[in-house]
Amino acid sequence: MTHARPLRSTTTGAIRGSIRVPGDKSISHRSLMLGAIAVGETVIHGLLEGEDVLHTAAAMRLLGAEAERSDDGQGGGVWRVRGVGLGALQEPAQVLDMGNSGTAARLLMGLVAGHPITCVFTGDASLNKRPMARVTKPLEEMGARFVGRTGGRLPLTVVGSGELVPIAYRLPVASAQVKSAILLAGLNTAGATTVIEAEPTRDHTELMLRHFGATVTTERLEDGALAVTVTGQPELTGRSIHVPADPSSAAFPAVAALLRPGSELLLNDVGMNPRRTGLYDTLVEMGADIAFENRRDQAGEPVADLRVKHSALKGIVVPADRAPSMIDEYPVLAAAAACAEGTTVMLGLKELRVKESDRLAMVAEGLTRCGVSVEVGADDSLTVHGTGKPPKGGATVLTAMDHRIAMSFLVLGMATEQPVSVDDGAFIDTSFPDFVGLMNGLGAAIVEA
């Protein structure tokens, strides 16, 4: 059981330095899963070694693959995964504990659904509250069976099948997790499985499937929707993967640097997948001084070094169609908006209601406690009224076991008149190991409360 870790963040001087934040969580999960069903060895450099991803690695071992870490000789780790081949995952002898990770749980449900095995999934108290029916519904259409709590919540038993039928499924809500679960289930079907999405969501699964040897096509339909199709029963071969730094994790030091006068920060090797960069597009529109240097590709993913300097931000309207490309970054954007001059309106945030917490409600409550004027609209919008001056702060913010809420308000505390505390920072390690040490090394002042 994780013990609560209250933290307090105090106004600091400039944020300065050059760092590489931990590896991309989305890509790390997928590299372990696809490596486990590929033939041969997959070598992964830069894997995020946070609790979420380590739960995925443990689950792949229980399913029959080998996944081991060795030292790269430079203070980092190299992970080697020896896969069992497509369709050959073994029935685990133990429950698969996915910790705090909705991504791991939903994607792995899709992967095991295409195998004739039975698996029981569980997670921590936060994950076990999150809805899984959006994933189980299409997988049931393909032929898998599920037994879970009301609303399809964990703990949940998956009864897979080696004879799933391919489907064409139109996503009712934009979700890369649901799309990915269906595509992964479609790997072990005889035929083509298609997911149709009205709004493009992050495409790490498609890119990595191609990297391992699968055939994945995308087609723009007459109504503007995107149809993503995977051809079943490919020969997947182990690959070398270099995981870029996570753009969602880079958001926290980036916003901290924008808010503190005199700051200049270089963030190295950040993933710049265009379906993940909505926050950076938004910050630039708000007046942020962010330069994207040394653009390049790594294993099919675009990366760049980000040079961030202190900037006076202005309030803007953030359109709803940008939500899929920045769904995890709204809490830290709200912190930036609280320090901007003028009103920032964020539209189309319904998906925030079903993240690690009800992030929309949690952000609004936390900002209100810190003296910021906010409104949550009936249309699931968030309006933040900034004055161009540091907010009051001086509050303890409830995190509801949500790592991004905790990090966002610790960043805000670097700019407020009075310190900001969070009731629990223990869950930060799920996605950003040593967040406190790294931020303090740049000039922040985060301490145990």
Image (spheres, helix red, strand yellow):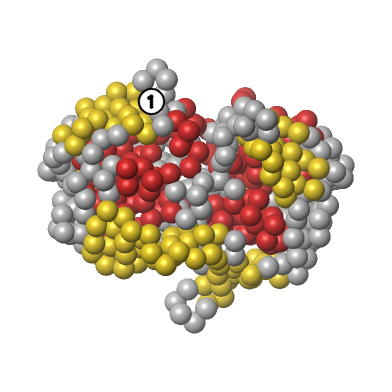
Task: Identify the residue shown where x is 12% and y is 43%.
Answer: 417
Query: Mark 1: few, some, or many residues within 10 Å (few <14, many ≥20)?
Result: some
Q: Amino acid at mark 1?
A: Ser
Task: Identify the residue shown where x is 24% and y is 30%.
Answer: 343
Q: Is residue 36 above or below residue 125?
A: below
Q: Is residue 225 above or below residue 35?
A: above
Which residue is situated farthest in the front direction here?
222
Q: Is residue 68 above or below residue 289?
A: below
Task: Please indicate whether residue 114 sits to the left or right of residue 276 in the image.
Answer: right
Residue 112, image x, y percentages: 74, 47
Task: Identify the residue shown where x is 69% and y is 51%.
Answer: 94
Which residue is situated farthest in the bottom direction here?
73
Which structural element holds mark 1?
A: loop
Q: Quadrant of residue 299?
A: bottom right
Q: Quadrant of residue 16?
A: bottom left
Residue 51, image x, y percentages: 50, 55
Q: Could you tell me if residue 368 is visible in this image?
A: no
Which residue carries the number 1 mark?
381
Q: Is residue 274 above or below residue 377?
A: below
Task: Please indicate whether residue 30 sits to the left or right of residue 143 in the image.
Answer: left
Residue 254, image x, y percentages: 31, 54
Residue 62, image x, y percentages: 69, 57
**How many marks are shown on the rendered structure?**
1
Task: Please indicate whether residue 426 sits to the left or right of residue 442 in the image.
Answer: right
Residue situated in front as seen by the camera: 93 or 22: 22
